[in-house]
Image (tube, grey):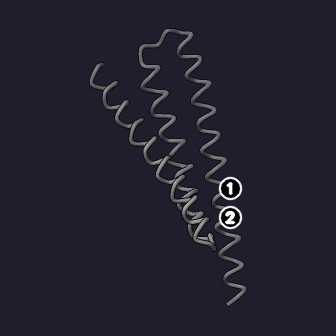
């Protein structure tokens, strides 16, 4: 049973790192594309930037949800829960901005 627990911990930690890094890469690439679009005066810059940031946050949120699998103490659960709530709120706000931007265009 301890072997299965160790294997689960290893798989979850690897998945957390994969999702975290993927989210960071998506946000960085989106930011660079946003700068380029802004310089080119593209009218859809805000929309593209918002969609990319939302996608990056979704990956980061997924990693936090996975992190709940390996937490051992109640204080860790509270911290992870607070992070999940903040990221979910950011995601909701960004999706709201995306919908408003799409209505304007």
The answer to whether 15 appears left or right of 103 in the picture is right
* Residue 104 drawn above or below residue 63: above
**Residue 50 pos. (x, y %):** 46, 30
**Residue 2 pos. (x, y %):** 71, 87
**Residue 60 pos. (x, y %):** 57, 49
Tell me the element at label 2: helix
* Residue located at (58% from left, 56% from top): 63
Compare residues 44 and 90 and report the one nearer the observer. Answer: 90
* Residue located at (62% from left, 31% from top): 29
Quarter of the view holding residue 23: top right
Tag 2–tag 1 contact (CB < 8 Å): yes
* Residue located at (68% from left, 73% from top): 9
* Residue 14 drawn above or below residue 2: above
Residue furthest out toward the front? 75
Compare residues 15 and 80 and report the one nearer the observer. Answer: 80
**Residue 83 pos. (x, y %):** 54, 52
Dot label at residue 17: 1
Dot label at residue 57: none
Q: CA distance from mark 2 to mark 1?
A: 6 Å
Quarter of the view holding residue 100: top left
The answer to whether 99 appears left or right of 50 in the picture is left
Residue furthest out toward the left? 103
**From the image, which quarter does the C terminus lie in?**
top left
**From the image, which quarter does the N terminus lie in?**
bottom right
The answer to whether 9 appears left or right of 101 in the picture is right
> Crowding near pointer 1: few (<14 within 10 Å), some, many (20+)?
few
Q: Which residue is mark 2?
A: 13
């Amino acid at each position: 049973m301890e072997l299965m627990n160790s294997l689960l911990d290893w798989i979850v930690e690897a998945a957390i790192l994969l999702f975290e890094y993927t989210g960071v890469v998506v946000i960085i690439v989106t930011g660079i594309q946003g700068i380029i679009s802004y310089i080119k005066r593209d009218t859809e810059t805000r929309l593209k930037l918002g969609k990319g940031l939302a996608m990056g946050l979704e990956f980061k949120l997924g990693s936090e949800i996975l992190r709940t699998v390996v937490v051992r103490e109640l204080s860790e659960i509270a911290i992870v829960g607070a992070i999940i709530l903040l990221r979910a709120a950011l995601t909701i706000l960004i999706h709201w901005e995306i919908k408003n931007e799409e209505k304007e265009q």
